[in-house]
Amino acid sequence: MNQILINYITGVTYPVNVYVADEYGNNTTFVDNITGPVPPSVVLTCPPLFNGAEKVMLILTDSSGCGVFQIIDCNDFYALATENWIPFTTQEGYYIEP
């Protein structure tokens, strides 16, 4: 997988930081900072560390510290939207509504 396409992001406070990790959440690597609404779609390049990986975890964290993640099968092309993502809570107990 070289690129990831995100079609839309809902329920966030911009900017949104994008990270990629292995499927277990290890080796988290910053990929990009999305400063405005999605759509329009955003194309991201997967870090070279994950070349050859079967799966990666894509993590989005908004400016409030709330986040969602999704495990991606690298053999498939994904056009991602946050409606299918798994929210994780912050210390304040808030999360991004998928």
Image: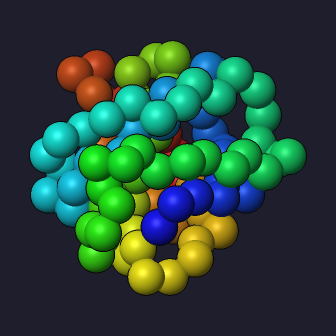
Q: Residue at x 14, y 46 (%)?
A: 26
Above or below residue 40? Residue 62 is: above
* Quadrant in the rendering for residue 28: top left
**57 left or right of 82?**
left
Q: Residue at x 65, y 59 (%)?
A: 5
Please say whether residue 35 is visible from this viewpoint: yes
Q: Position of residue 20 (x, y in %)?
A: 36, 46
Q: Quadrant of residue 29?
A: top left
**Pick the front one: 36 or 29:** 29
Q: Position of residue 45 (x, y in %)?
A: 55, 48
Residue 96 location in percent, x, y?
A: 48, 40
Is 65 above or below relative to 43?
A: above
Q: Is residue 50 above or below residue 32?
A: below
Left or right placement of residue 42 versus residue 3 in this view: right
Q: Residue at x 37, y 48 (%)?
A: 48
**Which color mode does the image show?**
rainbow
Identify the residue at image location x=40%, y=45%.
Answer: 47
In the displayed structure, would residue 25 be above or below residue 32?
A: below
- Can residue 59 be seen here? The reply is no
Percent coordinates x, y for residue 1 in the rendering: 47, 67
Taking the view exactly as shown, the residue that stands out farthest to the bottom is 75
